[in-house]
Image: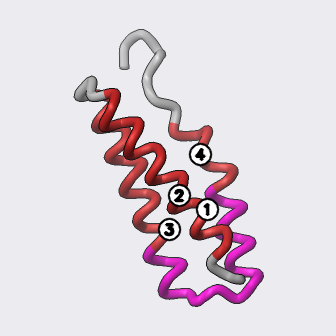
């Protein structure tokens, strides 16, 4: 994005990294953890695509879905 106001995917990174580490330390099923982590990354890529396509409602829905997947990662080890 030319004006520097594009989507910043780094804001989601700390929670994602912490969630994956915590789930791993809690002994989460590695296959489920891998699938959820992959889904989160794909949702974030889709989020950027919706930003570029100027589709704010779809982008917000995808952002929320990615947040819920991240929370699922966080609690999958319990």
Q: Which mark is residue 71?
A: 1
Identify the image quadrant of the C terminus: bottom right
Q: Tell me, yes or no, whether the highlighted magenta stretch contains residue 18.
A: yes
Contact flag, marks 4 and 2 (Cβ < 8 Å): no
Contact flag, marks 2 and 1 (Cβ < 8 Å): yes
Cα–Cα gap, marks 3 and 2 = 12 Å
Mark 1 or mark 4, which is nearer to you?
1
- Residue at 57% across / 60% down in the picture? 70
Cα–Cα gap, marks 3 and 4 = 12 Å
Query: Where does label 4 land, which residue?
Result: 12
Q: Secondary structure at mark 4?
A: helix
Query: Where does label 2 land, which residue?
Result: 68
Q: Tell me, yes or no, whether the highlighted magenta stretch contains residue 48.
A: no
Q: Secondary structure at mark 2?
A: helix
Magenta region: which residues?
16-35
Residue 28 appears in which quarter of the rendering?
bottom right
Instruction: Point out residue 56 in the picture as x, y percentages from the top left corner.
Output: 34, 27
- Residue at 59% across / 45% down in the picture? 12
Identify the image quadrant of the N terminus: top left
Query: Where does label 3 land, which residue?
Result: 37
């Amino acid at each position: 994005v030319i004006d520097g106001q594009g989507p910043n995917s780094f804001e989601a990174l700390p929670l994602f990294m912490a969630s994956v580490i915590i789930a791993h330390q809690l002994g989460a099923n590695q296959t489920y953890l891998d699938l959820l982590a992959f889904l989160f990354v794909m949702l974030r890529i889709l989020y950027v695509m919706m930003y570029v396509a100027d589709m704010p409602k779809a982008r917000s829905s995808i952002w929320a879905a990615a947040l819920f997947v991240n929370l699922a990662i966080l609690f999958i080890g319990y």
